[in-house]
Image: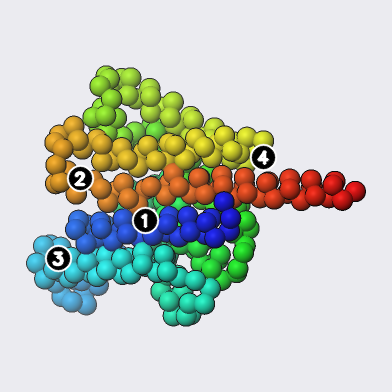
Amino acid sequence: MNQKQLLWLLKLCSFLIFIGRAYEHLYWDAPFRTLLWDQNLFGGIVENIFNTSWNDYVTSKRLDYFIQNAIRINGLFYAFCAYLSLTIRNSSTFFLKTILTFGGFSLLFLSFLLSKSKFFHIAMFLEHAIQFGTPFALLYCINRKKTITKIVTPLKILVALTFASHGLYALGTFYPLPGKFVVMTLNIIPISECIVKRFLFTAGILDFIAVLFIFIPKLQKTGLIYACIWGLVTAFARVFSGFSYDISFSIIHQYLYATVFRIPHGLVPLLLFFIIKSTRNKKLIKSLNLNYVQ
């Protein structure tokens, strides 16, 4: 793949992340209440400054209306960032690049809220590394022409953080094994719960092996191929697991957004694979040309 095709794939990854989150915010929900309903943070302000009891505050329909609208507005913002991801270029205005930058920071903040909702599990935050890091990788490439090969190491780190964090949950030793992992697997594969847990434990081990391979030159392609396949499998599992209940538009609508913003978990490793392959091919051609001249 040439530079233009590689950049297009990076743009596609950024687009899918933003459009998936836009879909989630516009039609479903977001963890804004995790912050706004934190009594340790806002209890004193609500009760002392606004002279309102905490119970009245959290049960206020007016506040709930405000939160719902804030979520929808954020969804529209993500939708615009998705559009920018596909259309932005080096010649784009500083204003548009700044908007996409704020989009990246918004995804970073969203990851923080998701982590807060899980008692500040660091793995929950880092599991979204690909999602909040990809827009910044795109902006780097846009601002500096023909430098997509220079984001190999940052992208490797994003992939490693995402899969290592995912592996920590799958192991079920550092953090409790998420029930949704078990349910999704049971809905797709007709096996016992005991075997599912063993399967997920094995998947967690493989996640860590893949992370290790990614940083070993002779094994990095193998690690990236695994990450690509497993990243896509876990993304589409969200939709396929719902089919066990009913194959209908409502089921697809309920799970599709989670699949969309996770597809880059498979595409970013694929992008890395193509960048490394392209770089090595160029070095090989250059070496062959030098030998021919000599």
Could you say whether the residue bearing mark 1 is in a helix, strand or loop? helix
Q: Nearer the viewer, mark 4 or mark 3?
A: 4
Could you say whether the residue bearing mark 2 is in a helix, strand or loop? helix
Contact, CB < 8 Å: mark 4 with mark 3? no
Give the residue at x 31% y 20%. Answer: 194
Instruction: Give the residue number, with chain letter if any, for mark 2.
Output: 252
Name the kind of residue labelled 3 in the image. Asp
Instruction: Give the residue number, with chain letter if any, for mark 3.
Output: 64
Instruction: Give the residue number, with chain letter if any, for mark 4.
Output: 217
Q: Nearer the viewer, mark 3 or mark 2?
A: 2
Answer left or right for 62 relative to 170: left
Query: What is the residue that sits farthest to the right in this orientation?
Result: 294
- Circle 4: is it few (<14), some (14-19), or many (20+) Cα within 10 Å? few
Contact, CB < 8 Å: mark 2 with mark 1? no
Q: How many marks?
A: 4
User: Can you tell which mark lies on residue 16?
Assistant: 1
Residue 138 in the image: state x and y as whole percent.
50, 63
Q: Is residue 250 visible?
A: yes
Residue 253 in the image: state x and y as whole percent.
19, 49
Q: Is residue 168 visible?
A: no
User: Can you tell which mark lies on residue 53?
Assistant: none
Contact, CB < 8 Å: mark 3 with mark 2? no
Could you say whether the residue bearing mark 3 is in a helix, strand or loop? helix
Residue 25 in the image: state x and y as whole percent.
24, 60
The image shows residue 266, relative to residue 218, as above or below, that is below
- Circle 1: is it few (<14), some (14-19), or many (20+) Cα within 10 Å? many
- Measure the alpha-carbon separation of dots 1 and 4: 29 Å
- Measure the alpha-carbon separation of dots 4 and 2: 40 Å
